[in-house]
Image: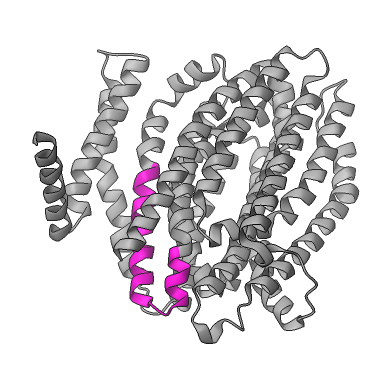
Amino acid sequence: MASENKRIAKNTGFLYLRMLFVMGVTLYTSRVVLQALGVEDYGLYNVIGGIVVMLGFLNGCASSATSRFLTFALGSSPEKKELYDYKKIFSAAFFIHLAIALFIVLLAESIGLWYFNNKLVIPEGRYWAAMWVYQISIINVLVSFTQVPYNASIIAYERMNIYAFVGIYEAITKLCIAYAVSVASIDRLVLYAVLSFVVTLSISVYYRFYCVSRFGAQCRIAKVYDSHLYKRLLSYSGWDLLGSFGATARSQGVNLILNLFCGPAINAARGIAYQVEASLYSFINNFLQAVRPVIIKKYAAGEMNNTNRLLYATGKFSFLIFSCVAIPLIIESDYVLELWLVNPPVYTSIFLKVVLLTGLVTTINNTLQIGAHASGDVKRLNIYGGSRIFIEIPVIYFALKMGASPEWALIIILIFTIIINSANLYVVKKNIPFFSVLSFCREVVLHGLFVVVIPTACAYYVHTLSFSYGIARVICVTFVYLAVLIVMVYQFGVTIDQRKKVVELIRNKIHIVKK
């Protein structure tokens, strides 16, 4: 157990180092790129080039599906090694995702191209620039999907330090791109799309080289004729991709509907809100990436009590970690956006508030998804998640058509996220022995809400005081929230034994310092 906790802490540390650097650079470059492109071009990129971001999310979900099988292969008992052959799973996954990528490219060049030419709202004189961005986005599909088995291998082998180093490289190249776009004399939108793709391609090449050189034959593509293996992978990955594709299509569908009714400026506001959320959500993704392979290996070894223990702890702490940045930002979003962007697009602040609230709910849902992935039965999970699009998109479309303000598109998504989150609890219960819905709701959901209510109220009270304004108030609000949250977690978030260990650890550190 000690080595397991040490490994999780080490991997989380690498990922947080990556996150802090990447987040700071991303938020700065977003401001530079927004100013260089202008609101309309930035919004246009988020509609068209946004397919890359959405497919990046889809790619991440596909990677988690493949990594489950690869991680299971590493953690399974000796008698199951023949059933979970790493080399065969890797190659079969590559061919499956290559086929999926080609299918999506076919759709993009037919139905997608029709929508681009007939329905998309493109400012006058920007058609060919938009077409360049669209075609580059399609090429990204091939790169992203064929990259899935390599990303999954790095996760399965828990080489999180590689993600840290590559993340720093990506952040530095983003700074270079932002500078190049700001001083360019050619079409800046096209240049931004091309340079972003070059960075993505270079990272993909490095990951492939690393996996082949470090893991050897395990990550070399070979012909696989095992039809039973393809059926198992397609059954699992197919359901997982269905849910992921539904989420991707829903997000991009909302973007297109906002473009249809409100124009590119609203897409820019939505793009900024989701970019901030993605940067902040890396706090959770880093923790989840570190703990995910451990949970899957525990399940593979048949340690159900440890599996449930880790699921409860992961759900609770991911919610609290995200609240540390989300809630102060919700309270101070107006000033932070003005400080960051100077003149943020209209609706950016309200979009950001709703998106961050949705993110708080999603942290719990992602924990449940890890449990379902560990068991291998993800059919119900993805049917519920994937079918949301058939309800949400029509509701959002008619709401905006009837005159609802743009933020209602995101509020509707928040409501459905809460509903689906409740349904997923019962999906996990069917798959994992001894998992209790009532215990999870009590120990994770209700307990998490109880712990954050008082810190939120205290932080908001500081926000309403007139003694400070600007960056000083932001610092005060954040400090008060964190301070009160720590007290609440210490009093109500840990057991008496855990509390004694914390006190003993602090005393030992003080004793060492005195020496």
Q: Is residue 394 visible?
A: no
Q: Residue at x 73, y 76 (%)?
A: 230
- Left or right: where 396 falls relative to 317: right
Residue 96 pos. (x, y %):
76, 66
When the figure is inspected, residue 99 is found, relative to residue 413, above or below; the finding is below
Q: Residue at x 75, y 81 (%)?
A: 226
Quarter of the figure that contains the N terminus:
bottom left
- Left or right: where 455 falls relative to 219: left
When the figure is inspected, residue 242 is found, relative to residue 275, above or below; the finding is below
Residue 287 pos. (x, y %):
43, 50
In this rendered view, identify the residue nearer to me: 68 or 244: 68
- Left or right: where 427 falls relative to 46: left
Coloring applied to the structure:
one colour
Can you tell which quarter of the image residue 385 is in?
A: bottom right
Quarter of the figure that contains the C terminus:
top left
- Queried whether the magenta region covers residue 318, the answer comes back as yes
Q: Which residues are magenta?
A: 294-322
Residue 63 pos. (x, y %):
63, 58
In this rendered view, identify the residue nearer to me: 429 or 210: 210
